[in-house]
Amino acid sequence: MKNKFLATLLFACSMGTLSAQTPVYLDDSQPVEARVKDALSRMTLEEKVALCHAQSKFSSAGVPRLGIPELWMSDGPHGVRAEINWNDWGYANWTNDSITAFPALTCLAATWNPEMSARYGKAIGEEARYREKDVLLGPGVNIYRTPMNGRNFEYMGEDPYLASIMCVPYIQELQKNGVAACVKHYALNNQELWRGHIDVNLSDRALYEIYLPAFKAAVEQGGAWSIMGSYNKIRGQHACHNDLILNKILKGDWKFDGCVITDWGGAHDTYEAAVNGLDIEMGSYTNGLTSESAFTYNDYYLAHPYLAMLKEGKVPMSTIEDKASRILRLIFRTAMNRQKPYGAVCTDEHYAAAREIGNEGIVLLKNTPVVKKGAPLLPIDAAKYQNILVVGDNAVRLLNQGGGSSELKVKDMVSPLDGLRAVYGDKVQYAKGYAAGRPMYGRADEVPQTVVDSLRAEAVEMAKKADLVVLVGGLNKNHFQDCEGGDRLQYGLPFGQNELIEALQGVNKNLVLVLLSGNAVEMPWVAKVPAIVQGWYLGSMGGKSLADVLSGAVNPSGKLPFSFPAKLADCGANAFDALSYPGDSIKQVYKEDVLVGYRWHDTKKIPALFSFGHGLSYTTFAYGKPVASAKTMTTDEMLTVTIPVKNAGSVAGKEIIQLYVGDEKCSVLRPAKELKHFTKIALEPGEEKTVTFTLTPDDLKFYDETASAWTLEPGKFKIYIGASSTDIRGMVPFELK
């Protein structure tokens, strides 16, 4: 039924359960807390407990007797998932649930542009509202710890500050539609292998400095209405009912007033779920995606077993009062919010947003001339090339398919091949080059070697006759790649792509490589390939975005939200024994501590192949000398830094100016430098703008494990202004007194 609230209300009226005097909880002109208190006073214990667990695969109960509707949830965070059956994991095969696929969150993070995040949240919120969803399961803000994590494409990179800044506008604009963000996966779900039970152990510094800041920003600045607990354990206790991260940090320190929802099947114990901060249990007695069971929803940990413990006095009544209050608050903010706007789906505005986010997120990794003093291959000049060969499975593959819960049913999907043909017409020929098998979850096709050899040979023969070759490769959304439920098995490119790249380059030096992935990959051929583009998973308008950038209609301005290690052992998480990654199947220790990503590369002096924050342009930007407002700073003062930046090239472009801070001497190990501020500016050719950053005492703090508090330590610091974490354009020293 199109209006769930109205249907529930009419049912309640027909049953004679509403009095002539309108209850406060139905009056949305009243404060939410008054409505919560009123509704709670009218509910039975059984009705309160019924709120706390699923009633179907993607809904939890309301209170029909009182006209309080259920909550409907949907997977995100890149689009609203197709409708799932009530009581199994099959698709319902509706004809009206096709949506817009937006670029993956790695691409959003690569824009380094909060305005793009706001547009993303607004558009996806409108689509969720149109589909009558109350809770969208996203965004994901787990930290990129290792490139082997199959789910990195759903997150916002390796830096907690970047992820914090980028997640807030998404959440705020999403929730303006009366749809709750469910920020995930809280916390430390940084791998898929053994995700259901791996026990993560780490220092308090790593927890507070690296893995929690984005969640904190989502709650305190974004005002998120719900949080999804993760599957893994943290220090011996499952994250979905973990006293430390739920009771003490989330609801205690951060004053979170929303709901904690399990990841599907993430609850494991009734008592712990009752007392350790869980509010809504979803998906138990399944493995999250594929299996069914004989258990009913009333057999969930927070269903009849919880009710029995409450009646027997084994858990305090205060626990159900708190849970029911939070769930009612969520219902009043979403399902019973009569002030929310109408939704929309697959509109021109949504397609434009998806395309522009893709345009700003695509990263130009490399663009060198093929011959000495020659012009770079990119952008592709249509007048220069008569025969353009596009190669690669990813040039035509529907990359919205696969990936687990992020799989999307799209109304429209523009492939890279379609996008390039729209610009270059019949100059474009196509060869598959390699085969990656069918989109599947939990397994992958084995492609016969005869097929591999045949496809490669065909592409190489066509490349000999081409003026330019564009190979669209990378990973895809199948098992053991960028996919939920399993980590990658290799750091290198799969499906014989390394051999294909070498063979193509051997017969045609004019080779452009476009990598579509949510992860870094090993590049043994990097010195030979003149042009490399990191294209991410770009969604419905992905082919248009790629064509915009490759043709020069759009000047690339994306920067990497994570480092590309030259080899896997160069990554901090992978530099130690197996206990660091992937663990021993039971326990894991984060041995790199706070040195995640560029913090590891910089501090250990292990150069990355492509650095955090790296991204080239079709123009050049000249940085002037940074100037600080003072040479010293006290613990209650702020410091401003100004830098002139000029477009020294011949085309308009956007540049991301990054500010890092390094502590010269400290009582604890600190990274060589850490990102503290950034801004993205647009400049016409010859135009110059002055960028101003304000440094606060909070920017200089570290988490003191002895004091269990954030601490300022006086001493000498350096401010680094860079175009990436390694491309430093200026430095300013100062002293904290």
Image: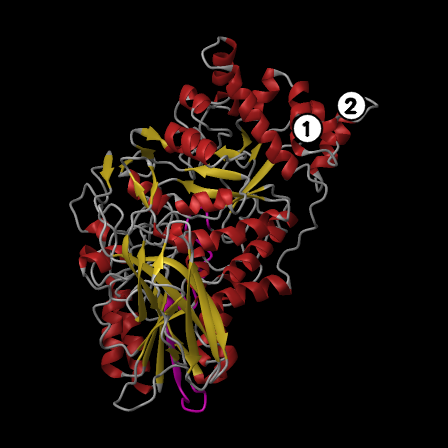
Q: Secondary structure at mark 1?
A: helix
Q: Amino acid at mark 2?
A: Leu
Q: Nearer the viewer, residue 393 or 533?
A: 533
Name the image colouring: secondary structure
Would you say residue 221 is visible in this rendering?
A: yes
Outermost residue to the top:
312
Quadrant housing residue 632: bottom left
Give the residue number, with chain letter if any, for mark 1: 34
Q: Earlier in the sequence, mark 1 or mark 2?
A: 2
Closest to the observer: 499 or 116?
116
Q: Does 566 sit above or below residue 33?
A: below
- x and y percentages locating residue 125 in the rendered image: 59, 51
Q: Give the magenta part as a residue range.
A: 381-406
Residue 547 shown left or right of residue 351 in the figure: left
Residue 423's mark?
none
In reply to whether residue 208 is colored magenta, the answer given is no
Spatial separation of the CA atoms under disc 1 and disc 2:
18 Å
Majority secondary structure of magenta residues: loop
Check disc 1: other Cα within 10 Å, few if <14, some if 14-19, many if 20+: few
Q: Residue at x 63, y 32 (%)?
A: 70
Q: Is residue 431 above or below residue 135?
A: below
Q: Which residue is mark 2?
A: 18
Q: Amino acid at mark 1?
A: Ala
Give the percent coordinates (x, y) of residue 397. Answer: 43, 63
